[in-house]
Amino acid sequence: MTHTIAPGEWLAAVRPRTLTATVVPVTLGLALARRGGDLDVALAVMTLLTALLIQVATNFANDYFDAMHGADGPDRLGPPRLSAGSDAAAAAMRRATAAVVVLAAGAGLWLVWRGGWPIALIGVASLVSAVAYTGGPFPLAYHGLGDLFVFTFFGPVAVGGTHYLQRGAVDVEVLLASVPVGALATAILVVNNLRDIDGDGRAGKRTLAVRFGRPATRVGWMLLVAVALGLSIELGGWIVLLAAPLALYECRGLLIREGRALDASLAGTARLHLVVGLLLAIGVGQS
């Protein structure tokens, strides 16, 4: 019997709650660019749309390739993945991934027309990495490079690329401001990998959590949060201190939660990323 994929299943595969990881750095890049004059609104909208399409393509590819690698088996602690349901669902996800990559490339062509060869390089690297994150001959996430991928593309690339499109340049302050949002996006992945550490290990997915174990992974999360909060306060001013109670609350939760309970820490870290990123955008926009 052919399984018909419901709209709600496709929406779950998009992982809408993760999309703030793209919205935040683009918003920060626009806030930094706004200090140099009025924004090109159409360009800003297309930047966000293209970035979101690339993230959805990454999410779809991750759904498909993790299922093919056996990383999303019946013992998975997180939400079930569409591709793991049946061969027909996996084939549909493969086609959907290709379709979203094409859409992202099409939207990106307009950005290339506006931004030139640096944006072309960013676009090509982003689309290749979207698939190479969990697919291809050397899947990044399976070799402990997922954290570097997330930090790079959800930090300096997203913030710097957005600023470059608006102003035609990127300076040291822009790159520094990208570090907190990149670090907190990485912290989201760290919690995800901490939760999935046993299943990933069995599937041969050698994340940093699998390589270094639970205690070191928790320390790594706290270091990422500390660096992000400290640098955000330095760059954005006192307003970012409003996020400190939330950071302390999430730190306590991460230290006591295990297994499926870490879903709460995953959601909390995403919330912290959103709050710190928006407060930082407000702070740098007023400086």
Image (cartoon, rainbow, N blue to C red):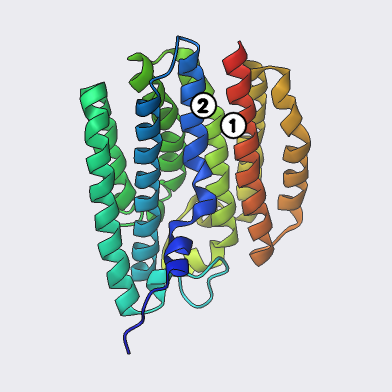
**Contact (Cβ within 8 Å) of mark 1 with mark 2:** yes
> Image height check: is 94 above or below 207?
below
Say which residue appears at 50% left-offset and 29% top-offset.
27
> Image height check: is 161 above or below 36?
below
Q: Is residue 147 or residue 38 the one in the foreground?
A: 38
Residue 70 in view in this figure: no
Residue 211 percent across, percent down from the top left: 50, 54
Residue 28 is tagged as 2
Residue 204 quadrant: bottom left
Which one is earlier in the sequence, the residue at label 1 or at label 2? 2
Residue 225 percent across, percent down from the top left: 64, 36
Q: Is residue 137 or residue 210 the one in the foreground?
A: 137
Residue 7 quadrant: bottom left
The reply, left or right, for residue 241 in relation to residue 8 is: right
Residue 230 in view in this figure: yes
The quadrant in which the C terminus is found is top right
Please, which residue is most extreme toward the front here? 42
The reply, left or right, for residue 17 in relation to residue 100 is: right
Say which residue appears at 38% left-offset and 71% top-offset.
83
Residue 107 percent across, percent down from the top left: 27, 39
For label 2, count other residues whose C-alpha is less than 10 Å away and answer few (under 14), some (14-19) or many (20+).
many
Tag 1 residue: 277
Residue 233 quadrant: top right
